[in-house]
Amino acid sequence: MGDPAENRKFLRVTTEVEVDVTGAGGSASGTSSDLSLNGMLLKADAPFPEGSTCRATLFLDGRSGGARVVADGYVARTLPDGMAIEFTELLGLESWQHLRNLILYNAEDPVRAQAEFDSHLGLKPR
């Protein structure tokens, strides 16, 4: 079977930012370990059940800073030490711009990341 990374629609970058998640599963705080345009892997002590809808707030410059990404989504997978959240909507233009910049800054291949942005309209392929 092929490498699952080859089947992904979006480039993933390794980056750690503080994250709060709220939804039907309650609330949880944690740290991102893997991030893309359409989701993230979140290290958290109290993961939500798979399928739970949620809102994630990523604090790019700490909780007291103003740079944030806010996204609605759902828990695609629950792990022993966290959860994989797939974004369904980025809330506000600033969230899109901040997430894009965070991915560009942390990408091993920024040219590939830029090409990905150019080929997508938000979370959907063009």
Image (cartoon, grey):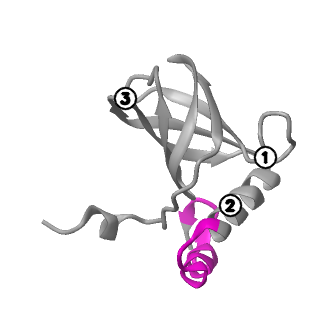
Q: Disc 1 to disc 2, how far (Cα)?
A: 11 Å
Identify which residue is drawn at 64% across, 44% down. 17
Identify which residue is drawn at 87% across, 43% down. 66
Identify which residue is drawn at 79% across, 48% down. 92
> Residue flagged by tag 2: what amino acid is it?
Leu
- Which tag, 1 or 2, sits closer to the chain's start? 1
Above or below, comparing residue 7 to residue 119 in the picture: above
| Residue for badge 2 | 102
Residue 73: say if magenta: no
Q: Residues within 10 Å of mark 2 (few under 14, many from 20)?
A: some
In front of the other: label 2 or label 3? Answer: 2
| Residue for badge 3 | 50
Residue 121: say if magenta: yes
| Residue for badge 1 | 61
In front of the other: label 3 or label 1? Answer: 1
* The quarter of the displayed image where residue 105 is located: bottom right
- Which tag, 2 or 3, sits closer to the chain's start? 3
> Residue flagged by tag 3: what amino acid is it?
Glu
* The quarter of the displayed image where residue 51 is located: top left
Q: Position of residue 75 (x, y in %)?
A: 44, 34
Q: Disc 3 to disc 1, how far (Cα)?
A: 29 Å
Q: Secondary structure at mark 1?
A: loop
Q: Position of residue 107 (x, y in %)?
A: 57, 71
Q: Secondary structure at mark 3?
A: loop
Q: Secondary structure at mark 2?
A: helix
Q: Which residues are magenta?
A: 106-124
> Residue flagged by tag 1: what amino acid is it?
Asp
Above or below, comparing residue 58 to residue 12 in the picture: above
Q: Position of residue 120 (x, y in %)?
A: 59, 71
Q: Residues within 10 Å of mark 3 (few under 14, many from 20)?
A: some
